[in-house]
Image: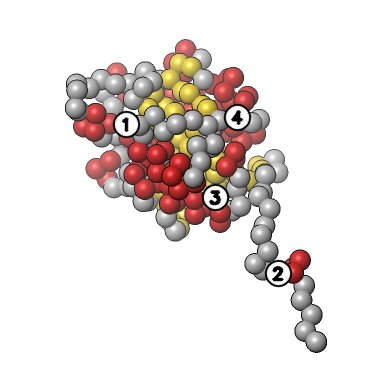
């Protein structure tokens, strides 16, 4: 008689890892997109990885870096699926690492916020952002945290796409590193202290914090 041990089955559903986090910077791959407003998510996670002295590895659906500190593990992800298909990468790594939705932070640009403003939320609509729209569709939920980085709205009617794919203006570039540093601090506060603490501390104009 063959005995079965379902408790030890490799197909048994694993519980979410509440001490693991996924920090996703949205952007487009390719040299022509480097340094553009739409790629600020990439810039923030790149700067976070540099500050924590960790390196990215090219894996399925994106570049991934792993950071373990004080009993918590954070995976940094830069999807290589292009902005409008970001959800595929987020869903894959969320399931691969058993990360609950509330431990996912999406970092993205936002034309509805003035340059230098940060706005973290526990959940919400996509606000017309195609990256967030695809993530919500792939996760079948809007209940995941996101950190919006204000890029302003200095464009004429019908020129939004051109605007977000342009590099920063000289006056913006001068204070960009400071704004990115605040976004790094907000992202790490999300991991170490929770979303509410990060919202209370960092939502607002980073240039005045």
Q: Give the CA separation, mark 4 to mark 3.
A: 18 Å
Element at label 1: helix
Q: Residues within 10 Å of mark 4 (few under 14, many from 20)?
A: many
Mark with earlier residue (2, 1): 2
Mark 1 — residue?
Answer: 37
* Tag 2 and tag 3, C-beta contact below 8 Å: no
Residue 13 is situated, as x and y percent measured from the top left of the image, at: 66, 59
Element at label 2: loop
Farthest residue to the bottom: give it. 1
Tell me the tag on residue 9: 2
Mark 3 — residue?
Answer: 94
**Residue 47 against residue 62 in the figure, above or below:** above
Mark 4 — residue?
Answer: 195
Residue 147 is situated, as x and y percent measured from the top left of the image, at: 48, 30
Q: Nearer the viewer, mark 4 or mark 2?
A: 2
Q: Residues within 10 Å of mark 2 (few under 14, many from 20)?
A: few
Mark with earlier residue (1, 4): 1
Q: Residues within 10 Å of mark 1 (few under 14, many from 20)?
A: many
Q: Give the CA separation, mark 1 to mark 3.
A: 26 Å
Judge from the rendering whether residue 11 lies leftward or rightward of residue 136; answer left or right.
Answer: right
Mark with earlier residue (2, 3): 2
* Res. 191 in view: yes
Q: Give the CA separation, mark 1 to mark 4.
A: 25 Å
Judge from the rendering whether residue 77 lies leftward or rightward of residue 74; answer left or right.
Answer: left
Element at label 4: helix
Q: Residues within 10 Å of mark 3 (few under 14, many from 20)?
A: many
Element at label 3: helix
Residue lying at 29% horizontally and 47% vertically, measured from the top left: 30
């Amino acid at each position: 008689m063959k005995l079965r041990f379902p408790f030890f089955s490799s197909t048994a559903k694993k519980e979410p890892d509440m001490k693991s986090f996924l920090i996703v910077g949205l952007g487009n791959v390719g040299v022509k997109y480097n340094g553009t407003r739409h790629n600020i998510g990439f810039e923030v996670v790149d700067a976070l990885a540099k500050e924590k002295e960790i390196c990215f590895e090219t894996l399925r659906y994106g570049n991934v870096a792993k950071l373990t500190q004080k009993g918590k593990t954070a995976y940094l992800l830069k999807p290589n699926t292009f902005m409008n298909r970001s959800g595929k990468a987020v869903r894959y790594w969320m399931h691969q690492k058993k990360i609950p939705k509330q431990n996912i932070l999406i970092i993205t640009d936002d034309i509805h916020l003035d340059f230098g403003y940060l706005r973290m939320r526990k959940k919400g609509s996509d606000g017309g952002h195609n990256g967030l729209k695809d993530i919500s569709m792939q996760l079948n939920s809007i209940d995941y945290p996101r950190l919006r980085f204000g890029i302003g709205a200095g464009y004429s009617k019908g020129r939004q796409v051109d605007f977000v794919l342009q590099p920063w203006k000289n006056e913006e570039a001068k204070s960009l590193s400071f704004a990115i540093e605040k976004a790094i601090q907000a992202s790490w506060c999300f991991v170490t202290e929770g979303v509410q603490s990060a919202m209370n501390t960092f939502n607002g104009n980073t240039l005045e914090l």
